[in-house]
Image (cartoon, rainbow, N blue to C red):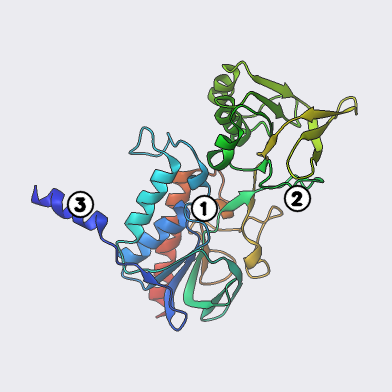
């Protein structure tokens, strides 16, 4: 009984402190998803002076309605899993900053992380774990109507479209998951896929097929999102015939994949054509003392559990670097 009480006390303990721009940390971690948060825990357990900079806590996990493939949980809501991650990090006296983004980084014996609020955070080593963000279609009407019927996150915005007609763009896992979430509450869901089939996992495709209010536009692409102050239609082209039709809809969810949040590091570390940061098996980048982990890297299979493992590797590599460089 005493052990359990102590464990509960430890879980509820919060020792995190604000970021200190006057200090030089051993390791500065950029990113608050599974990779970044795991890296923070491993660094602090190694008694390495650590800071973590978080723009959006949880990253993609916080926008996931259900997680069923993370060990230890048969099912957990994404927001709940992120909160458990946060609690574990904040047990330690880590320098913790949430809300500010990273504008750029500078290499050197002491690395500089320049935040978009004007502050600069310094560290002897960096762990880049900034994840990915939603790709945009880049069509007329998208930017202007974002938040007015154009959306990217069903867990955030699906309830706003109850009883309405909605278009979902994308037939991969994210697109089909979004269509499933929407089909449960919307009047009608139209899936627009640029291929001739859905590419999502079979279980997801089967789950979507169980709904009677879902239709599909295969081999098709969105040309324009139409509306003045809110979405009223989506112009879609059939790539086979070239014909264009307007689909009357009150909302559109764009689920066409993710782009790495790596722009702040361009020119500092090597990247592939997609902007993913190149790493070796120890999460080392092309620049000494800069490590990277999670979805922002070239490591395949973007999964929560893989990101967490890569975050642990990056932290341990960073700690070894600090030890060796004195």
Whichever of callouts 2 and 1 sits on the residue coming sooner in the sequence is 2
Q: Which residue is label 3 attached to?
A: 8
Residue drawn at x 71%, y 47% is 136
Q: Residue furthest bottom?
A: 22
Above or below: residue 234 compared with residue 257? above
**Disc 3 versus disc 2: nearer the observer:** 2
Above or below: residue 281 compared with residue 122? above
Q: In 3D space, how far apart are the residues under numbered discs 2 and 1 (Cα atoms)? A: 31 Å
Residue placed most toward the observer, 204 or 282: 204
Q: In 3D space, how far apart are the residues under numbered discs 1 and 3 (Cα atoms)? A: 29 Å
Q: Is residue 310 visible?
A: no
Q: Which residue is label 2 attached to?
A: 144
Q: Residues within 10 Å of mark 3 (few under 14, many from 20)?
A: few
Whichever of callouts 1 and 3 sits on the residue coming sooner in the sequence is 3
In the rendered structure, are the residues bearing label 2 and label 1 in contact, judged by CB atoms less than 8 Å apart? no
Q: Quadrant of the C terminus?
A: bottom left
Q: Is residue 273 visible?
A: yes
Secondary element type, mark 2: loop
Residue placed most toward the observer, 274 or 313: 274
Residue 40 image label = none
Secondary element type, mark 3: helix
**Disc 2 versus disc 1: nearer the observer:** 2
Residue drawn at x 43%, y 50% is 308
**Disc 1 versus disc 3: nearer the observer:** 3
Q: Position of residue 175 (x, y in %)?
A: 63, 34
Residue drawn at x 36%, y 68% is 94
Q: Which residue is label 1 attached to?
A: 294
Q: Residues within 10 Å of mark 2 (few under 14, many from 20)?
A: some
């Amino acid at each position: 009984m005493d052990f359990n009480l102590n464990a509960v006390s430890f879980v509820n303990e919060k020792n995190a402190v604000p970021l200190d721009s006057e200090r030089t940390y051993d390791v500065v971690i950029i990113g608050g998803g599974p990779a970044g948060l795991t890296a923070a825990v491993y660094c602090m357990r190694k008694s390495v002076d650590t800071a973590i900079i978080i723009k959006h806590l949880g990253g993609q996990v916080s926008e996931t309605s259900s997680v069923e493939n993370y060990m230890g949980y048969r099912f957990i809501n994404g927001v709940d899993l992120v909160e458990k991650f946060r609690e574990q990090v904040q047990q330690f006296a880590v320098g913790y900053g949430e809300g500010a983004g990273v504008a750029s980084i500078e290499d050197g014996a002491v690395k500089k992380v320049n935040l978009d609020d004007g502050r600069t955070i310094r560290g002897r080593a960096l762990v880049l774990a900034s994840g990915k963000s939603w790709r945009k279609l880049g069509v007329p009407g998208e930017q202007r109507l974002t938040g007015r019927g154009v959306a990217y996150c069903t867990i955030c915005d699906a309830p706003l479209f109850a009883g309405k007609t909605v278009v979902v763009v994308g037939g991969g896992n994210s697109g089909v998951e979004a269509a499933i979430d929407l089909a449960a509450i919307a009047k009608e869901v139209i899936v627009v896929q640029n291929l001739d089939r859905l590419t999502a996992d079979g279980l997801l495709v089967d789950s979507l097929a169980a709904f009677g209010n879902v239709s599909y536009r295969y081999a098709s692409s969105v040309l324009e999102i139409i509306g003045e102050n809110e979405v009223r239609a989506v112009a879609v082209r059939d790539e086979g015939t070239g014909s264009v039709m307007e689909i009357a809809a009150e909302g559109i969810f764009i689920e066409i994949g993710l782009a790495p949040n790596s722009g702040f590091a361009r020119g500092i570390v090597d990247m592939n054509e997609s902007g993913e940061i190149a790493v070796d098996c120890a999460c080392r980048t092309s620049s000494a003392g800069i490590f990277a982990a999670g979805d922002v890297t070239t490591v395949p299979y973007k999964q929560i559990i893989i990101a967490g493992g890569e975050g642990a590797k990056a932290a341990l590599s960073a700690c070894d670097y600090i030890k060796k460089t004195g």
